[in-house]
Structure formats: structure tokens, C-alpha cells
Amino acid sequence: MAAKASFARRLVAWQKAFGRRDLPWQGTRDPYRIWLSEIMLQQTQVGTVIPYYQRFLAAFPDVAHHAARIVVAQHGGHFPSDAEALSALPGIGRSTAAAIAAFANGARNAILDGNVKRVLARHGGITGFPGDARVQRRLWRCAEALLPRSDVATYTQALMDLGATVCLVRRPRCESCPVARDCIARREGRIAELPGSRSKKTLPRREVTVLLVERKGEVLLKRRPMTGVWSGLWSLPEIETGGNLVAHCRAQFGVNVIPQTPLPAIEHAFTHFHLTLHPLPCAVREEAARTQEPGVVWMPLDDIAGAALPAPIKKLLRSRATSRLLAQQG
């Protein structure tokens, strides 16, 4: 408890000596004006907010002239100043409600905005991405445990200022930090890694074999369905990896093929999954009537550049056309 009390005392003392005390929304206990500043500060930096804040107040000096109809209807036009009532209003979260209540009437509630999360994660050595529910619960417990019994408004402003001006994302000014001596991130050389980043989502993987059914400089293309991946584009026929491609080509396209050496796999990432294409060249063994099935066409490799094909398929076929041309020249 002594360490926690010391943390708060050091922040309060630092705020009184070095913190920001001349901002236009400071020195007021009007919860409406405090709310307005908090909402604006969520969008951008202090320097940008100040002129907008001043112009907004000049036009809408109190809540009765603002669009906050719920405040007028449920609170008689008086902006609430306790955290519970504030958090019930649209657009006001737990941390913002606590900050307004602290500045308006010194209410003792913890805050946890983005800057404060960074301060507490570094000071307490709290690992993990702050947006994860488990990590966020731990940060809230830390924020509540460090809350002082008095000077809550000053302490709250100190936390905000510390995160905004000292404990920066990059190049933090640790030499100016009042709680640097027991900061775990500084002591263990982990400032750059705390707070943790969002873990990259592992995408599901799909694999499919695409058939390069070739004959006399032409390749067989099949139109994709109008819904789903590459909808409506022409592409190579597909078959499940390990499927009987000879029987498939005979049944679907009326051609007898001879499988050839597989080409290197092609990796392609979509938003929701990762696709691995296994290109398998297939030479037509015998002359057969050109298929007249709808949605199927034989296209000269020389015409691929202007065709409506998925990017990885077009790249593959252009490479195939180039290889064929070089072979003819050799």
C-alpha cells in the first residue's frame, strides 16, 4: 500500500510543479464543459482541440443549446456530474465518465484512456495487448488500486499529462518521469515492448489444385461463380488436391489429358483466409472437339494480358506464355 500511495503522491506533486494547468477547460467544474473537452480530446491532440473547443462553447455555451436531448429530457438540462449517471449517456464510456466526475466534483473513480494504459502497462510491467479483455481487466484493477484518497482531480490530470507529454509511445522522456525509479519497463529494458501490440490473427488456410489444360498455345479457362472469391472472373479449372484430374477433365471438359510436372505453389492472402494454389500443367493427349459448355473457353496464351483474370492466375499464365515463347525461340 505504501508503494501505491507513493505512486499517487509523486504524480500529484509532479502535476503541481510541471503539469499543464492553463488549458481552457481547466479551472471549471462545469461537467458540460469538461465533457466537451474529453470528447474532443479523444479525437485529436490538445493543440488542435483548443480553438475548436473555444468556438464550440461560443456557439453552444450550455447543454440546453446542444443536441444532448437526453440530458435535457432526463436531467432537466443539468449535465450530470457523477460517474454512474454520466456513463449511462450515449457516447460516454467508463473512463470518460470517471474523468468528468473527477474534474467536476472530485469523485474518486479510476480512468483508463489510451495514454493511461501505456503508463500503467509500463510502470507495472503488464504484458499483452491492452485491447484484450483479460489485459484490460488487469489494467483496470491496477488503475483502481493506485487511486489516491484525496486530490483525485489533480491525480487524474497528472496521469493524463504524464501519458501525453512524458510516457510517449516513442522516445519517452523517462528522465522527467516522477515514477521512473520503480517503473518495471525501464528497469528491465522493456519500454519498447510495453504495452503489447495486437497479435496478428492467424488466417485459416485453404489449398486447391488449378489445372493448366493446354493445347496448341491455348489454355482452358472456366468462369467463376458470380458470388464468392474472384466472382465472375475467368480462371483456371480447380480440383480438390488429390482428386482424379484425368477423370475430371474427361467428364467436365471432354478432353483426355496427361498430367505433367507440377509447378511451384502460389501463395495468395485474402482478408479472411490464406490460399495456396498448386498449378498442375496437363497436356491434351488427343485432338478433341472444342468444348461448347457455357462458362468454359479456350484462350490463346498470347491474349492473357487483356483477359479478366484473378491477379495470381494472370501472373502464372503470363509466365507460362513467356516460357513457351523462349522455348520456341531456342
Image (cartoon, rainbow, N blue to C red):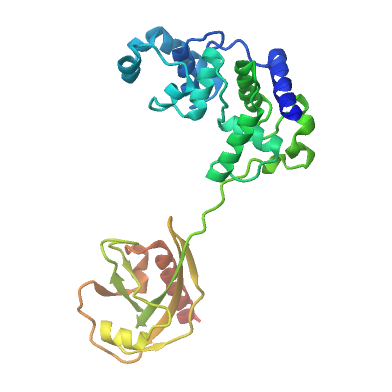
Look at the image and tell me whether residue 132 can be seen: no
Q: Quadrant of residue 213?
A: bottom left
- Residue drawn at x 57%, y 21% as measured from the top left: 108
Above or below residue 177? Residue 132 is: below
Above or below residue 256? Residue 19 is: above
Q: Is residue 107 left or right of residue 68?
A: right
Is the N terminus in the top left, top right, bottom left or bottom right quadrant? Answer: top right
Look at the image and tell me whether residue 73 can be seen: yes
Q: Position of residue 12 (x, y in %)?
A: 69, 18
Q: Nearer the viewer, residue 127 or 61?
A: 127
Residue lying furthest bottom = 286
- Residue drawn at x 31%, y 92% as measured from the top left: 286
Q: Position of residue 256 (x, y in %)?
A: 32, 90
Q: Nearer the viewer, residue 222 or 59?
A: 59
Q: Nearer the viewer, residue 287 or 75?
A: 75
Q: Position of residue 123 (x, y in %)?
A: 70, 35
Q: Is residue 247 left or right of residue 330?
A: left
- Residue drawn at x 52%, y 23% as measured from the top left: 98
Q: Quadrant of residue 174?
A: top right
Above or below residue 296? Residue 161 is: above
Q: Is residue 81 left or right of residue 219?
A: right
The total of numbered circles placed on residues is: 0
Q: Position of residue 262 (x, y in %)?
A: 48, 81
